[in-house]
């Protein structure tokens, strides 16, 4: 069973959620893991891509959209279709409102909750489903 970390932000905006996703991506990357950010659609993946480019002036997180020719050669991918087949060192950051098919192949999964009503409702349902499936769910209340 996977460990699911829920990061609960006090903010309501998508920008705050993406900014925290960048911080989390940097932490995961610095620990030597691969990371897949799973998004609801290509538009959100492109927003996350732009956020990663602008995240810090003094750092670069090597990343690519899943439909890019670079996707196989970078440690951070952003996708909206099927989950990739992970290696042992791959973590999943789920920005999709639902739980995607294939999560059972990931040992670590992160979810980011902000205080936007749609996100709260969707992620509460995810939390309950993860628990029902027997995963370890760990909350992290921030701010």
Image: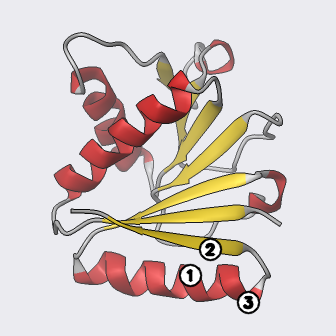
Proximity of marks 2 and 3: CB atoms separated by less than 8 Å: no
Q: Position of residue 143 (x, y in %)?
A: 21, 62
- State the residue in front, 25 or 95: 25
From mark 2 to mark 3, how far is it between C-alphas? 10 Å
The residue shown at (30%, 47%) is 20
Q: Residue 133: which quarter of the image? A: bottom right
Sequence-first disc among 3 and 1 = 1
Q: Give the residue pinned by disc 3.
A: 132
The correct choice, above or below, for 73 with respect to 93 in the image is above
Q: Position of residue 73 (x, y in %)?
A: 65, 12
Proximity of marks 1 and 2: CB atoms separated by less than 8 Å: yes
Q: Is residue 65 visible?
A: no
Question: Which callout, 2 or 3, points to the residue nearer the camera?
Answer: 2
Left or right: 83, with 12 as reference point: right
The residue shown at (16%, 62%) is 13
Left or right: 35, with 1 as reference point: left
Q: Position of residue 90 (x, y in %)?
A: 71, 37
Q: Give the residue pinned by disc 2.
A: 137
Q: Is residue 23 visible?
A: yes
Using a 10 Å C-alpha cutoff, classify the residue at mark 1 as few (fewer than 14 neighbours), some (14 to 19) or many (20 or more): many
The correct choice, above or below, for 103 with respect to 27 in the image is below
Question: Which callout, 1 or 2, points to the residue nearer the camera?
Answer: 2
Sequence-first disc among 1 and 2 = 1
Q: Residue 127 bears which disc, if any?
A: 1
Left or right: 138, with 115 as reference point: right
In the structure shown, which secondary structural element does the residue marked by tag 2 occupy? strand
From mark 1 to mark 2, how far is it between C-alphas? 7 Å
């Amino acid at each position: 069973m996977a460990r699911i970390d829920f990061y609960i932000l006090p903010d309501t905006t998508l920008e705050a959620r993406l900014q925290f996703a960048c911080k989390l991506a940097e932490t995961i990357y610095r620990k030597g893991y691969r990371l897949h950010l799973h998004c609801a659609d290509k538009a959100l993946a492109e927003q996350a891509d732009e956020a990663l480019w602008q995240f810090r002036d003094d750092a670069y997180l090597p990343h690519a959209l899943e439909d890019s020719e670079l996707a196989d050669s970078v440690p951070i991918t952003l996708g909206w279709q099927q989950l990739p087949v992970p290696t042992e060192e791959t973590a999943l950051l789920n920005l999709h409102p639902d739980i995607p098919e294939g999560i059972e192949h990931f040992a670590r999964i992160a979810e980011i909750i902000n205080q936007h009503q749609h996100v709260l409702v969707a992620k509460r349902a995810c939390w309950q489903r993860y628990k029902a499936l027997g995963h370890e769910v760990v909350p992290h209340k921030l701010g």
